[in-house]
Image (cartoon, rainbow, N blue to C red):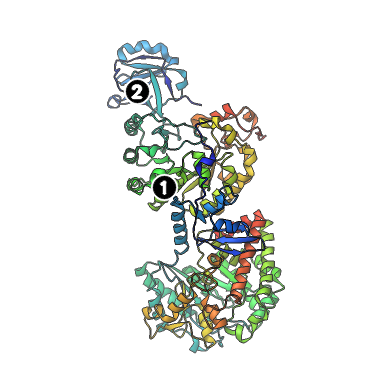
Amino acid sequence: MSKFQGQESYGNQLNYELLPFSFDRFNDDEYILTNLAGEHLMMSAADLPTLINRGLDPSHHQFASLRSKHFIRYPEEQAPLSLLALKVRTRYSRLPPFTNLHIFVVTLRCDHSCPYCQVSRQMEGEGAFDMTQEMADRALDFVFRSPNPAIKIEFQGGEPLLNFDMVKYVVTEAESRNQQMGRDLQFVIATTLSLISENVLAFCKEHSILLSSSLDGPKDLHNANRPRPGKDSHQRFEAGLKLARESLGYDQVSALMTTTDRSLDRVRDIIDEYLRLGFNGIFLRALSPYGFAIKTKKFMSYDAGRWLEFYKEGLAYILELSKAGIPFIEQYTALVLKKMLTSEDPGYVDLMNPAGIGIAAIVFNYDGAVYASDESRMLAEMGDESFKLGNLLTDSYEQIILSDRLLDALDESFTLSAPMCSECAFEPFCGADPVYHHAMYKDVLGRKAESPFCQRNMAIFKHLIELMRNDRQTRDIFMEWANGC
Amino acid sequence: MLKLGGKVARIDAVDVSDKPHLFRVSTRDLPGALRKDRAYLVGPENIPDGYVHYLVPQAHESRVEEFTEIGAYTVLPPEYFYLGHDDVIRLSADRTSIRVLFRASSNHNSILMTEQCNHYCLMCSQPPKSADDSWLLNEIEELLPLIPRDTAEIGFTGGEPTLSGDRFIRIMGLTKSYLPRTAVHVLSNGRSFANLDFAKKYAAIQHPDIMVGIPIYSDDPTLHDYIVQAKGAFDETLRGILNLKMLGQKVEIRIVLHKQSIPRLTELCEFIGRNLLFVDHVALMGLEMMGFTRANLDVLWVDPHDYRDTLSEAVGILSRYRMNVSIYNHQLCLVNDDVQPFYRKSISDWKNEYAPECATCSKRDGCGGFFSSGVKFGYSSKLVPFL
């Protein structure tokens, strides 16, 4: 019918413009293109120069996707710029509200003596490593200086339950102050659950406190990783878990695992243990080069490559489970996927840019020292105080937040200007981890080509993209994970 | 299909004027004070006097002799059997034809604002006309005060309703004033809202429950522009949506499924998940065999049976992105089971029918069925009645 025009009348021009994007070789034949909003597209090595030289024909099979993912536009189009700006603003929307997570190290004492422990363990019963009420008050002064309408206070140790009176004090005092401040206030206790009691749970229930715990795998593995008097860490965890779930609610207790050399051949056993105990996901974590892990050379006992094998085997098993109708997620994957498949950022401290230190999370040590992150205080326990931002007794909020130590680390590690990061196509999925790199290389950037952080994450990004593009079902599962976290 | 307008059988009116007249229909013996602007629909009962006009169904035509004393009347052909209390009708200026403007018993009242449009969609069910039809707007301003205050929902459609600019804004404002508790749905291509001043005027109405349903047919701007036959439409529509959402207004995205939109449907859904996560609802809609669709059938028709897996994938993507999604205008036996939670019976009651194949189906009550036009002009050859 003549009154209708053919499709060729609606966009056949060759005058497209490039919008900002990065590219990197993905394999022998293909490049990956990404933009600041985290959109990605695979393109053949042959087509890429044509695209960049603005010679790609509008009939090319990827031309429409290049436009809709905002890699190119026609000069008269305005929506692509508005949408790109909106997406990038959304990804950075956690920055303006500032610090959310405030970690209170209420004691260094612990009933466990894990060889990889990231902070010095101290004997039970010594009061010298406990946070005092005065210190807690100062820390709370600091907490409520954060402009963030949502405040999370996490209690760490040691084992925080060994100084439960201080936990109770901080919670009640924070709630009392919050009647004026009106923040969305949330509490978490990081505990092994070994010392959980009806008493503790009653308090947690009354104040809606979440529990974050540790589970390294089946009994033999867990107990080998986590020695304590009686060698009963796993038994206590399982009993505590049941008690806590009954009292607080099934999903109010989470667990984290740490990968040691003993774990490497047992990823299925570990996942099965999480399944058996009714968890709907697992966080496959590599050992960090901090604290006792470095002293005992634990973290050197496997390299990034070996850990990746472990991770990939675990992920494959989890996907197998999901496809069989047993919903279970790998949480690190889910965080990365959120950055890949959505326009949001999950706000995971290790994968943020600018780095999350200080501005996403901050740590108050028992002795009043303020650290830029949990890893920072572990580094300090080893004698490296690069990320000790000040002390609650002597320094003001402004002195600490505006300290050169914090600002320089944020500035120098900023991935959009860091060598090898700024031009990396995987940057939108990644983050700055100045503390890690300082621990490894004594400088916040490190050498990316050698960095296990870089190796590990690049391999994960590529692996996830491969998995998705080869299998629609995996892509569906990943999309669910990306939006569920 | 209900007949909503046409010639009347016979008229005896003393009030013939040069203006059309809108009446509320009454079937009840209302107090005298309420009879002055209502038309009484004659039934078997005694006919109360004092109504400004009387509607006499042909079945009761023998009663017209009673009207010598009672007043002006119109004899209605049998197609208007459905008329009821609180409906609103229009008698033309010459009093020779009737149009039903509002049906109190229906949840699908849709008010035509104009037949003009800046799109010329390949599958338009209501092909646009360029003639000045601003009389429709005058009529709407008369109609709004007559609609019952407890009406749950009304729709405004076109053409492109926003083309009248400030007049559109005025009518939305009147709708809020007269019907503050009525949900309002506007079918628009959204392009007018790319003008931020216009979008602000619309938002300033502060209607508590209004939503604009805006079509996006592809993530590929060229393909969208081709489908709506308007260059630059995609860009303007997107900017319109962004303005509306920036101003806190509700927006629904409507995607009509056909041979042009199906091939990139999953890409479109991912585009929505990444770019328009904040829209309030996404509707995936079957093709209506009306208007231009029939002329462009070769470039539009695809059997829903053949795209059922694509539809499942599309719904899967949108629901994983946690979006509200609905499937409209589809038949139960032509969609996969996994989309059941999103399946809606959506076709307006007055044009909803079932095919002969459906006679033995046990799930008819749960099925959206067809547009009347679908039954008449073609539908899937793969219907399978549930037994």
Identity of the residue furthest to the left in this view: B33
Q: Using a 10 Å C-alpha cutoff, classify the residue at mark 2 as few (fewer than 14 neighbours), some (14 to 19) or many (20 or more).
A: many
Kindly identify the residue that appears in the image at 57 percent across and 83 percent down.
A291
Q: In the rendered view, would you say B104 is above or below A36?
A: above
User: Along the line of sight, which residue is nearer the eye, A352 or A88?
Assistant: A88
Q: Is residue B67 visible?
A: yes
User: Residue B88 occupies which quadrant of the picture?
Assistant: top left
Amino acid type for the residue under numbered disc 1: Gly
Closer to the N terminus: mark 1 or mark 2?
A: 2
Kindly identify the residue that appears in the image at 52 percent across and 52 percent down.
A67
The image's mark for residue B230 is none
Indicate left or right for B15 with B231 as reference. Answer: left
User: Along the line of sight, which residue is nearer the eye, A121 or B316?
Assistant: B316
The answer to whether the residues at label 1 and label 2 have Cβ atoms under 8 Å apart is no
Amino acid type for the residue under numbered disc 2: Ala
Residue at mark 1 to residue at mark 2: CA–CA distance: 42 Å
Identity of the residue furthest to the right in this view: A265
Q: Is residue A328 visible?
A: no
At mark 2, the secondary structure is: strand
Indicate left or right for B193 with A336 as reference. Answer: left
Q: Chain of mark 1?
A: B
| Image coords of residue B217 (percent x, y) | 52, 43
Q: In the rendered view, would you say B236 is above or below A137?
A: above
| Image coords of residue A70 (percent x, y) | 51, 55
Q: Chain of mark 2?
A: B
Q: Which residue is mark 2?
A: B39
At mark 1, the secondary structure is: helix
Q: Which one is in front in this view, the residue at disc 1 or the one at disc 2?
A: 1
User: Along the line of sight, which residue is nearer the eye, A318 or A403?
Assistant: A403
Q: Which residue is mark 1?
A: B240
